[in-house]
């Protein structure tokens, strides 16, 4: 702690020779109000006003030290007790009205300076707190008295009477009344109600007291309910049906039919306030339909309506019904239909009419001839050949014709000629000629002239047989046999083959084989004298094939050519079709749309793709394309997709399931996931933490994201008003919003308590007397203070008591008896007493002093050189007269035989250590 030391030499006091190892009383007192300090020691008193260096500090501590000057013996300081007083402040709370009149008991509190104080408003019947002035309502005690004024205004009572039109739900008028609480309102509703009933209203209810009421602190609200008076009457209406029967010329054919009229009624409700009329539904009094009416039969005439159908659903708003039935002279009809049976279409229709039993005078002969002239053929005719007569019933006849057809034959020939010639020219043998003949049928439609062709058919087979070339001595044919030619069709061109005969020589043949098809592409035959160079290479021929898309596989003909030999030489060049590969792709798409129930996008679409590919291999020779099977590049399924989580909403599909077995033919897939708004719940549980029981639970519900509109303030206040104290409240102060997950909040309260302290003392007194009963020394007094707390539960009123505790452990210390010259005490020491309890009675002891006879030497009780005590608490006090108002310290003698003065710090060089201690707050003993 910060402090200061002051040396006050001018007023320092000296003391004489010490008193031979005896403790000497040292008394110090300080008045916190006057700032005056007094010290008495060894018969010397020093007094000083220390306000000049204390300043504004209200609390302080002191340090006491002693000096032995030049001597080596240590001074011993034993603190018996130290009593001091700290100045206190006062706060006065006044409760007044606006005119300054006292309206409630004044409250006065006191406390140590710089300690906190709190004043509070009072609830005063008939008054409302307005403001405070003067000192702050809470703060710290000060040296001067502080006054807080709570100002109240007189309460005004209010009454309102609302007149409500219960028919419309609107307020007709409102009467506002005000006055001092306890005054009579002198108002009744009678006149106002009469004004409304005169205007057409009816009284429903009136909760305003018929004899009036008085104003109170609480606002009073009354309601007079009226409704608009209604008067009910009735209205009539009639609907009629009339049927007229007439001939075509308009003249009367039969008497009119008049149906019994249909009668309707409805209620009419008239509002006596607004004059507005409200109509009820029309009600049928004798049914809401007219029955069926059969038209009269008149010989030789036919009614255009054999009956008038029943008419139902007639309402009061239906117009009168007028019907007319017209009678016509009876007529017979005949129709003859001509049908093209080849096309199924109707060629024409002949309609005839006339009186019943009259002849029709019609035959079908001319019409049929007109069609056969156009190429038709008659199939059937059910119309009588001699005609017919008209009857009451319609007559229907059908003439069926078909397209006539003409057939002819078409012929075509495919020729083969084989020429046999010498190498140098000239006919080597007669040509070989062969023919394949084809024929087909041509059908001509004589109506449309359309021609239909039959398939060509071979009359003598569809192939040319193989033909062996003639043998000519000395020559060799380049084809020993012309091979059979099959698959000849009518579209095959005429075939010409030349077989060439060469003189016999060495021969070389080079065969070019299409290894892809296994067929011979061509064959190069060479001949010449044996030993002669052939003069041929395969390069150009191979190039001609590679230019057409072939690829060389092998060529066993010598690269630089060869020579003719006696034996024929055969070489093979193998080629294959070159291939070109390309990849074709096809995509199947999946899109998942996320939408809100009422419309609008809820989340970005999910898109996924399955890609299929196939290889297209193109034969570079034939141009033919070969397609591989489609294969899925990234699997043939769409993985399951978890729907996005959107706060406050729930999807109708939490997951779109996996879709397997996707093929290249699968259509694009579209899925829609719809989100609906969630409903959230909140519960707030109020728990009595003292008992562990639930006081109440508030259940709330609403759309997620919506504000709950609830706070705990009012409920907490209702409990604190009953004595509870808030422990914790995890519900947000400003409320919260509903969420997807249920929300649980807890407000914990405990029983508020009031703690009071109860004290009880046990006293010890030791009397020091001579053996004649006279007082030998001042009494020794000691006190043990026991205390306990009384805790009152503000909710239940139940009180709980703590155990009694002693301020010094429940013991009275041992006490050395005072030394009186020439006397000896009956007890040099009064022993320590332990086990003192709150129930122990006060203790009194007596130490008796007896005169020591002359000539007897009494040795000293205390050592010449007492050692420094390790703990002042353990020293046994010597009984001295105790001054209750001042502390007493005892300084022992140092044993110094010199006559030097001992200068004490507090008497000569005095150190006063001042610090703003908050602990020195009230009168205490240390």
Image (spheres, rainbow, N blue to C red):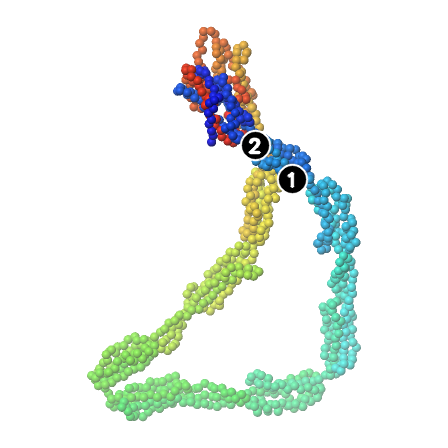
Which circle's residue, 2 or 1, is located before the other in the chain? 1
Picture layout, residue 564 above or below residue 731: below
Mark 2 or 1: the one toward you? 2
Residue at the image position 42 percent from the left and 20 percent from the top: 68
> From the viewer's perspective, is 76 left or right of 390?
left
> At 69% across and 83% down in the image, what residue appears?
393
User: Compared to 518, does 220 lie above or below?
Assistant: above
- Give me the residue at 74% from left, 80% from top: 327
Q: Residue at x 77, y 77 (%)?
A: 244
Q: Left of 649 or right of it: where is 417? A: left
Q: Which residue is mark 1?
A: 129
Mark 2 is surrounded, within 10 Å at the Cα level, by few (under 14), some (14 to 19) or many (20 or more) other residues, namely: many
Label 1: how many Cα within 10 Å (few below 14, some 14–19, many 20+): some
In the rendering, at what x and y percent does residue 809 appear?
A: 50, 25
In the figure, 749 relative to 642: above or below? above
For residue 348, side relative to residue 61 (left or right) = right
Provide residue 474's location: percent of width, then percent of height.
Answer: 24, 90
State the image coordinates of residue 907 (x, y, percent, origin top left).
47, 21
On the image, numbered disc 2 is attached to which residue? 142
Q: Nearer the viewer, residue 165 or 10?
A: 10
Between residues 665 and 439, which one lies in front from this camera angle?
Answer: 665
Element at label 1:
strand
Which residue is at the far front? 10
The image shows residue 477 at horizontal and vertical percentages of 28, 87
Q: Determine if residue 64 is in view.
A: no
Report if residue 31 is visible in the image: yes
């Amino acid at each position: 702690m910060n402090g200061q030391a002051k040396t006050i030499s001018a007023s320092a006091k000296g003391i004489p020779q010490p008193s031979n190892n005896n403790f000497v009383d040292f008394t110090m007192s300080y008045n916190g109000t006057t700032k005056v300090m007094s010290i008495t020691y060894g018969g010397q008193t020093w007094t000083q006003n220390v306000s000049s260096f204390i300043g504004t500090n209200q609390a302080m501590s002191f340090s006491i030290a002693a000096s032995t000057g030049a001597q080596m013996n240590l001074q011993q300081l034993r603190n018996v007790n130290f009593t001091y007083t700290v100045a206190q402040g006062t706060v006065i709370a006044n409760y007044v009205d606006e005119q300054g009149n006292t309206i409630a008991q004044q409250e006065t509190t006191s406390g140590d300076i710089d300690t906190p104080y709190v004043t509070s408003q009072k609830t005063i019947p008939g008054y409302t707190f307005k403001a405070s002035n003067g000192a702050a309502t809470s703060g710290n005690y000060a040296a001067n008295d502080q006054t807080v004024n709570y100002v109240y205004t007189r309460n005004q009572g209010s009454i309102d009477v609302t007149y409500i039109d219960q028919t419309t739900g609107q307020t007709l008028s409102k009467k506002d009344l005000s006055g001092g609480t306890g005054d009579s309102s002198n108002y009744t509703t009678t006149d106002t109600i009469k004004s409304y009933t005169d205007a057409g209203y009816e009284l429903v209810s009136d909760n305003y007291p018929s004899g009036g009421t008085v104003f109170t602190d609480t606002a009073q609200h009354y309601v007079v309910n009226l409704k608009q008076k209604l008067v009910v009457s009735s209205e009539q209406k009639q609907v009629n049906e009339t049927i007229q029967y007439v001939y075509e010329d308009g003249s009367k054919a039969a008497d009119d039919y008049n149906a019994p009229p249909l009668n309707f009624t409805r209620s009419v409700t008239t509002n006596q306030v607004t004059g507005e009329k409200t109509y009820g539904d029309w009600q049928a009094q004798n049914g809401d339909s007219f029955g069926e009416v059969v038209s009269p039969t008149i010989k030789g005439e036919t009614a255009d309506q054999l009956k008038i159908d029943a008419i139902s659903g007639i309402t009061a708003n239906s117009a009168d019904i007028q019907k007319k039935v017209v009678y016509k002279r009876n007529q017979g009809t005949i129709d003859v239909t001509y049908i093209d049976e080849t096309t199924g279409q109707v060629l024409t229709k002949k309609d005839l009419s006339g009186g019943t039993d009259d002849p029709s005078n019609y035959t079908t002969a001319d019409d049929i001839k007109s069609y056969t002239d156009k190429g038709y053929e008659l199939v059937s005719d059910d119309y009588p050949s001699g005609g017919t007569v008209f009857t009451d019933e319609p007559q229907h006849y059908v003439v069926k014709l078909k397209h006539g057809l003409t057939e002819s034959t078409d012929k075509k020939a495919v020729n083969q000629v084989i020429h046999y010639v010498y190498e140098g020219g000239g006919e080597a043998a007669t040509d070989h000629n062969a023919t394949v003949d084809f024929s087909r049928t041509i059908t001509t439609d004589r109506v449309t002239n359309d021609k239909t062709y039959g398939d060509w058919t071979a009359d003598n087979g569809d192939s040319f047989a193989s033909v062996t070339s003639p043998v000519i001595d000395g020559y060799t044919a380049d084809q020993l046999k012309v091979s059979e030619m099959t698959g000849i069709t009518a579209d095959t061109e005429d075939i010409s083959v030349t077989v060439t005969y060469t003189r016999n020589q060495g021969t070389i043949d080079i065969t070019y084989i299409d290894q892809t098809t296994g067929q011979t592409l061509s064959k190069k035959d060479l001949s010449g004298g044996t030993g002669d160079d052939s003069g041929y290479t395969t390069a150009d021929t191979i190039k001609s094939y590679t230019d057409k898309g072939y690829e060389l596989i092998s060529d066993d003909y010598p690269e630089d050519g060869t020579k003719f030999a006696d034996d024929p030489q055969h070489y093979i060049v193998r080629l294959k079709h070159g291939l070109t590969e390309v990849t074709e792709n096809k995509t199947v798409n999946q899109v998942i749309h996320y939408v809100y129930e009422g419309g609008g996008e809820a989340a970005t679409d999910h898109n996924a793709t399955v890609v299929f590919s196939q290889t297209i291999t193109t034969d570079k020779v034939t141009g033919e394309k070969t397609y591989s099977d489609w294969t899925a590049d990234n699997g043939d399924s769409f993985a399951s997709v978890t729907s996005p989580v959107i706060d406050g909403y729930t999807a109708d599909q939490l997951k779109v399931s996996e879709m397997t077995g996707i093929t290249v033919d699968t259509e694009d897939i579209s899925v829609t996931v719809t989100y609906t708004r969630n409903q959230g719940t909140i519960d707030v549980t109020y728990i009595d933490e003292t008992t562990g029981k639930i006081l109440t639970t508030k259940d709330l519900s609403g759309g997620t994201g919506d504000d709950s509109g609830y706070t705990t303030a009012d409920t907490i206040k209702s409990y604190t008003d009953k004595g509870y104290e808030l422990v914790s409240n995890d519900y947000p102060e400003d409320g919260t919003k509903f969420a997807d997950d249920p929300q649980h909040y807890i407000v914990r309260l405990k029983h508020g308590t009031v703690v009071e302290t109860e004290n009880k003392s046990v006293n010890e007194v030791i009397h020091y007397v001579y053996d004649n009963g006279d007082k030998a020394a001042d009494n020794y007094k000691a006190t043990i203070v026991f205390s306990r707390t009384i805790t009152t539960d503000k909710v239940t009123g139940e009180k709980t008591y703590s155990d009694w505790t002693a301020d010094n452990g429940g013991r009275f210390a041992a006490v050395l008896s005072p030394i009186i010259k020439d006397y000896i005490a009956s007890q040099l020491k009064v022993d320590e007493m332990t086990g003192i309890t709150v129930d122990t009675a006060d203790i009194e002891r007596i130490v008796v002093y007896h005169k020591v006879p002359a000539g007897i030497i009494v040795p000293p009780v205390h050592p010449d050189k007492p050692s420094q005590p390790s703990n002042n608490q353990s020293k046994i006090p010597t009984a001295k007269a105790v001054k209750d108002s001042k502390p007493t310290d005892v300084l022992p003698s140092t044993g110094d035989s010199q006559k030097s003065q001992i200068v004490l710090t507090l008497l000569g060089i005095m150190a006063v250590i001042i610090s703003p201690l908050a602990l020195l707050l009230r009168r205490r003993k240390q």
